Image (spheres, grey):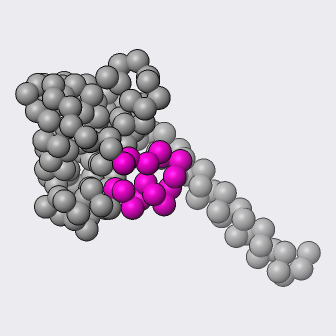
């Protein structure tokens, strides 16, 4: 067996071990935190629905971004996204929050739209804002598709 083939096999084997190890670590973490994640999702949905009464979707967006500003990890950020979806869905007054929202399948248009929406926020250059605002895009896509419960 040539030296090059040995090196390639070692690199491929090490890569497989690293990927498998990361998969096992991720699965273990999720299994340990499943109840906490479910509680976070339920709490964010409840808070988003409660905040929505008497609020406009623009206020929902501002509150979700404010909540995101306090985040230090992806779990907290996921809570802000869930809050925004629940709030936008339950908002008692409807604005034009879905006007000009591109479908998620249009990747470049989606990115430009999210950046444009985030320029209006207190932290226009943060990626966290674009990830949170993406949940509004999902909500708008559900509305456009006429999915039940999207309102």
Quadrant in the picture for the C terminus: top left
Percent coordinates x, y for residue 104 in the rendering: 48, 46
Q: Residue at x 8, y 27 (%)?
A: 54
Question: Which residue is rendered at x = 45% and y = 39% of the image?
Answer: 28
Residue positioned most to the right = 1
> Is residue 37 among the parts visible in the rendering?
yes
| Membership of 63 in magenta stretch | no
Q: Is residue 37 above or below residue 65?
A: above
State yes or no: residue 110 in magenta. Answer: yes
Whole-percent x and y of residue 73? 27, 52
**Taking 137 as reference, is 120 left or right?**
left
- Residue 75 in the image: x percent, y percent? 30, 44
Q: Nearer the viewer, residue 66 or 144?
A: 144
Residue range highlighted in magenta? 100-114
Q: Position of residue 112 (x, y in %)?
A: 39, 61
Nearest the eye: 33 or 120: 120
Q: Is residue 4 left or right of residue 63?
A: right
Q: Is residue 75 visible?
A: no
Left or right: where does residue 108 sit relative to residue 45? right
Residue 78, quarter of the rendered image: top left
The quadrant where residue 148 appears: top left
Looking at the picture, does residue 24 appear above or below residue 54? below
Against 70, is 47 above or below?
Answer: above
Q: Residue at x 66, y 57 (%)?
A: 16
> Number of marks in the image?
0
The N terminus lies in quadrant: bottom right
Seen at 43% across and 54% down, the residue is 110
């Amino acid at each position: 067996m040539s030296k090059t083939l040995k090196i390639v096999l070692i690199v491929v084997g090490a890569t497989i071990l690293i990927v498998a190890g990361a998969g096992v670590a991720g699965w273990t973490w999720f299994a340990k935190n499943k109840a906490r994640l479910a509680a976070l999702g339920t709490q964010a949905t409840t808070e988003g629905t409660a905040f929505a009464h008497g609020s406009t979707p623009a206020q929902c967006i501002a509150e979700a971004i404010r909540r995101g500003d306090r985040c230090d990890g992806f779990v907290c950020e996921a809570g802000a996204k869930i809050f925004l979806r629940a709030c936008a869905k339950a908002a008692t007054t409807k604005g034009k929050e879905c006007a000009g929202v591109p479908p998620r399948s249009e990747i470049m248009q989606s990115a430009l739209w999210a950046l444009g929406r985030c320029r209006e926020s207190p932290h226009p250059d943060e990626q966290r804002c674009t990830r949170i605002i993406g949940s509004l895009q999902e909500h708008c896509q559900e509305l456009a598709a006429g999915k039940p419960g999207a309102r």
